[in-house]
Amino acid sequence: MVKGMSISFDKAFGVFQYTMGIRNQRAEVLAGNLANADTPGFKARDLDFDIAFKNAAHVQMEEPSNMIVTNSKHMKHSAIEDEPELTMKYRMPYQADTGNGNTVEVSTERMKYMNNNLEYQATLRFLNGRISKLKSALRASM
């Protein structure tokens, strides 16, 4: 048995562990759009996956900062990165306004929800494969 060996989830799974969370958040947003399809004035939103993914990858790769706040007016380093509103966007409808101000197009939302679900499942299969390989490596080292 190998002693003192530790496994870093960031090294083992890369950004794919964060992808699962992003896909889950996107599913919630898309489901909320579908649930509000008949709500007057509701504006369809979507999570910008590319921006959220880049943010997750950036946070993962970033080295701990040695910045020191010497003045109370200095901006905190983490305040720059923790801006989830940058990943949420309002969706522009393909068809003209229905008159009640609602921008949810049910067919578009369903398609995006199903596509997000397929990508979530693909990521899950990838992670399961990685976990199986890690389990095999651990069994072999014992």
Image: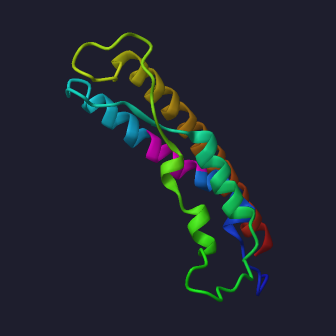
Where are the magenta residues, as a range? 19-26
Report x, y in % for residue 52: 59, 48
Report x, y in % for residue 32: 31, 37
Q: Going 37% across and 30% down the picture, which residue do you hit?
A: 44
Q: On screen, 139 above or below 56?
A: below
Quarter holding residue 28: top left
Q: Can residue 32 be seen in this view?
A: yes
Q: Quadrant of the N terminus?
A: bottom right
Report x, y in % for residue 89: 48, 37
Q: Nearer the viewer, residue 124 or 84?
A: 84
Q: Does the magenta stretch include residue 22?
A: yes
Tell me if 35 is positioned left or right of 10 in this view.
left
Q: On screen, 7 above or below 70?
A: above
Q: Going 67% across and 66% down the picture, which residue do you hit?
A: 9
Tell me if 47 is positioned left or right of 2 in this view.
left
Q: Nearer the viewer, residue 61 or 94?
A: 94
Q: Nearer the viewer, residue 79 or 10?
A: 79
Q: Which of 116 and 76 is in front in this view?
A: 76
Q: In which quarter of the image is the C terminus?
A: bottom right
Q: Is residue 71 magenta?
A: no
Q: On screen, 141 above or below 5?
A: above
Q: Going 60% across and 37% down the picture, which residue do you hit?
A: 122
